[in-house]
Amino acid sequence: MNKRGALLVLGSLSGGSFLAFAAISHWLYHLRGRERLGKTLLAVSCAFEGLFLYSFLVPNFPLTGRVFYRGRTDGNRVALTFDDGPRAPYTGQILDILKKEGVTATFFVLGENARRHPELVKRIELEGHRVANHGMDHGIMMFAGGDTALAQVESGDSALRDAGVLGPAPLFRAPHGWLSPLAHRAISRRGYRVTGWTKGVWDTALPGVRSIVSRTEELLAPGSILLLHDGWSGPSQEDRSQTVAALSEIIRRARSRGLEFVPVEQMMAEADLL
């Protein structure tokens, strides 16, 4: 299921259930002596619909399962993460900058892109970064069952192994951060830690280098997990040059605040979560 399809299903479910609640509330309201009950039911239905939508659309919402999206706030650690890669030439350019700056990052790799560019996946690991699982084809897991979710994860792992990755990180990040409770449970039981991010930068919208830098700067605080993108899903040739151009300045500003970049797993260990 793609993003548009998932949102369409979510909207249909939410709208249908709200109309049902509203109809019952209207009927009760016009029954003698049931006016207050009708109003109460309508209020409860509004609250339920809000919670329903929030739980699906907000990546770090705890009711769908525990997600690691922030480390300890009393230290100086931040984590730099990249999604949807690898893709040439952007992943290689990012790796060049990280090597020059002496920064270690975590790359959440799509299996289909690992098959397109196995040499880049292997380079990520060889240069000391952590390779983690982002599923196979960026399929949305908002309503996925456990078997569907595991198929995505296992296919992604297979692609990483075929690319020569020896020790992938036991982390999984769902596309768009949307993960059903059943999918979350299945993936967690398989030994993965579901990983989110502190707040989106939206570099995929190509807002300009200055905007990417300024949006990221707002997140430069101890414990933050920064999300950027070095690739994309599907065959379209989206541009990631703005992210590449912003990266050195992001690192410089983080260091000017005394912050140190570490892999996500190190943040987890320091938070006593591994």
Image: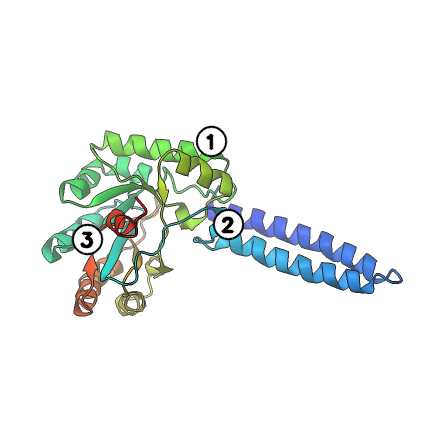
The x, y position of residue 270, in whole percent, is: 26, 52
Label 2 or label 3, whichever lies nearer to me, is 2
Looking at numbered disc 3 in the image, what kind of residue is underneath it? Ile
Q: How is the image coloured?
A: rainbow
Q: Earlier in the sequence, mark 2 or mark 1?
A: 2
Foreground residue among 196 and 73: 73
Left or right: 108 as drawn, with respect to 33: left
- Distance from disc 2 to disc 3, alpha carbons, whole Å, reads 35 Å
Contact flag, marks 2 and 1 (Cβ < 8 Å)? no
Q: Earlier in the sequence, mark 2 or mark 3?
A: 2
Q: Quadrant of residue 122?
A: top left
Contact flag, marks 1 and 3 (Cβ < 8 Å)? no
Looking at numbered disc 1 in the image, what kind of residue is underneath it? Asp
Q: In the image, what residue occupies the spot 12% across and 52% down?
A: 99
Left or right: 42 as drawn, with respect to 64: right
Q: Quadrant of residue 75?
A: bottom left
Of all residues shown, which one is farthest toward the right? Answer: 32
Residue of label 2: 63
Above or below for 219 versus 274: below
Give the crowd class for mark 2: few <14, some 14-19, many >=20 residues within 10 Å.
few
- Distance from disc 1 to disc 3, alpha carbons, whole Å, reads 34 Å
Looking at the rendered image, the quarter that the C terminus falls into is top left
Residue of label 1: 147
